[in-house]
Image (cartoon, rainbow, N blue to C red):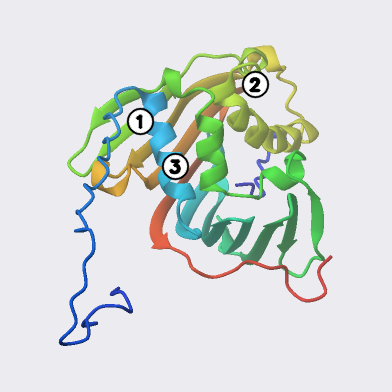
Amino acid sequence: MLVAVAVAVSSGCSSHDGERKPAGRHTSSKTAQAQPEPKVTPKPEPRTAAQFVARAREAMGAEKGWTFALRGSESAVMQGQAPSGATYAATVHRTTAPVALRQTGTVTTSKGEREPEVVYVVGGTGYVKKGAEGWKKGALSEPGIANDVEDPLAELDAFAAYAKSATVSRTGAGVRLRVRASGWQLSAARDRPALKRAVREVEPVLGQLRKAGVTATDGHITLRSFAETWDLGDGAQGYRVVAHRYAFTFLVPFQGGDITVSQEVRADNRGVFDGNVALPSGVK
């Protein structure tokens, strides 16, 4: 999620069922013997975070698509000033074959200003429209596009690369996987797989702060906290994704204090999506 943040820093049956042999005639045939049903070996119960992620990916990929309810917030706070930030709410429709996404929502700033936002991912390309602006398109590898796309299934795929760092706990309804981190300098966080998204998401805010006069280097910007949580269903549900939460806070030194930059995003699974996702007419 990327929203604008500014801080002032100047200070069935068989068809043969029911057939009968003709009466009065004798026929002989070999007695058909019932064939035993093939035994189905149950999958072993997952134990590690990586095994749970593998089962979750399998369960999510078995359906045509999914709907997610998305909520997010972003802020930059400096001591003695009112917080500057925004909140975001959206609905995401994500298909699995082919991979496509439609995300429609609204950004609300701390001043109460509201702006609609529409995001599509089709054919590996992202398309973003904010308010009355024209469509912006680009590869998903471009930060300016990636920061606007909230794709829980793509995030699950990415999580598989560092799931070994996650703790596993049982909840009343399933399983929870969680990764936490803190204390990393921004320069070192760039090389940590679990923190790559946090670094990418915070960069635009840091760019705004530097334009406003903040001179802190990467080696002095510190990750105060990071947490990523996956709530999965139980075995009967194939450990499908129930919810995904993602939050981080960085401390940016400035004039003897810190500017606190925070972001939190939550996606809740609202069930199977049977529709299709296609670009609006005229969008290329």
> Would you place residue 282 above or below residue 209 in this image?
below
Using a 10 Å C-alpha cutoff, classify the residue at mark 1 as few (fewer than 14 neighbours), some (14 to 19) or many (20 or more): many
Circle 3: residue type = Glu
Mark 1–mark 2 distance (CA, rounded to whole Å): 39 Å
Q: Is residue 174 left or right of residue 132?
A: left
Instruction: Name which residue type carries label 2.
Output: Gln
Neighbours of disc 2 within 10 Å: few (<14), some (14-19), many (20+): few
Q: Position of residue 181 (x, y in %)?
A: 46, 19
Mark 2 highlights which residue? 255
In this picture, is 240 found above or below 225? Answer: below
| Residues tagged 3 and 2 counted as in contact (Cβ below 8 A) | no
Q: Nearer the viewer, mark 1 or mark 2?
A: 1
Q: Residue at x 21, y 47 (%)?
A: 36
Disc 1 target residue: 177
- For label 3, the crowd category at 10 Å Cα-Cα, with few meaning under 14, some 14 to 19 and many 20 or more, is some
* Secondary element at tag 1: strand
Q: Which of the pair 175/198 is nearer the observer?
A: 175
Residue 20 spot, x, y in % from top left: 21, 83
Q: Which numbered disc flags the more N-terminal residue, 3 or 1?
A: 3
The answer to which image quadrant residue 203 occupies is top right
Q: Nearer the viewer, residue 69 or 273?
A: 273
Rendered view: 166 above or below 202: above
Q: Which residue is mark 3?
A: 58
| Residue 279 placement: quadrant | bottom right
Q: Nearer the viewer, residue 267 or 158?
A: 158
Instruction: Give residue 223's quadrant in the image.
Output: top right
